Image (spheres, rainbow, N blue to C red):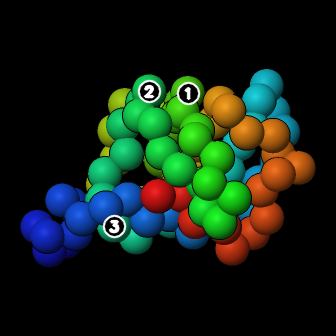
């Protein structure tokens, strides 16, 4: 992984979403790093969301880097407000 992609802004295209004790999204982190309790923006609807938990390969972790396939449980947005193709920034 090039070092620049870790310091780049977060970019995670959403491939799927579902409701399970909150809103859960699935996607591959293309750039940046995500940590538990981090605040991010869901584009294009500009909702501010907080990462409640994140799983990489179904293992819960506190932070992840680019290239990881992730499941994130979010606070601040409902599952119905997210469509595949939205980007978490």
Q: Is residue 27 visible?
A: no
Residue 20, compared with residue 14, is above or below; it is above
Instruction: List the residue tagged with mark 2.
Output: 37
Q: Nearer the viewer, residue 73 or 38?
A: 38
Q: Residue at x 53, y 50 (%)?
A: 41
Q: Residue at x 58, y 38 (%)?
A: 49
Instruction: List the residue tagged with mark 3.
Output: 31
Q: Quadrant of residue 61?
A: top left
Which callout, 3 or 1, points at the residue further toward the start of the chain? 3
Residue, far front = 46
Whether the residues at callouts 2 and 1 have beta carbons within 8 Å, the answer is yes
Image disc number at residue 52: 1
Which callout, 3 or 2, points at the residue further toward the start of the chain? 3
Residue 22, compared with residue 26, is above or below; it is above
Separation of marks 3 and 2 at Cα, in angstroms: 18 Å
Q: Residue at x 36, y 37 (%)?
A: 35
Separation of marks 3 and 1 at Cα, in angstroms: 20 Å
Q: Nearer the viewer, residue 81 or 68?
A: 81
| 29 to the left or right of 84 | left
Whether the residues at callouts 3 and 2 have beta carbons within 8 Å, the answer is no
- Report helix, strand or loop for mark 3: loop
Residue 55, compared with residue 4, is above or below; it is above
């Amino acid at each position: 992984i090039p070092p620049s992609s870790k310091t780049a802004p977060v970019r995670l295209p959403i491939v799927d979403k579902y409701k399970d004790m909150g809103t859960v999204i699935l996607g591959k982190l293309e750039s940046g790093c995500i940590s538990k309790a981090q605040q991010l923006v869901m584009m294009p609807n500009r909702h501010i969301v907080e990462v409640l938990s994140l799983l990489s390969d179904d293992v819960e972790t506190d932070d992840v880097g680019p290239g990881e396939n992730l499941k994130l449980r979010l606070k601040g947005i409902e599952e119905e407000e997210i469509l595949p193709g939205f980007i978490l920034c």
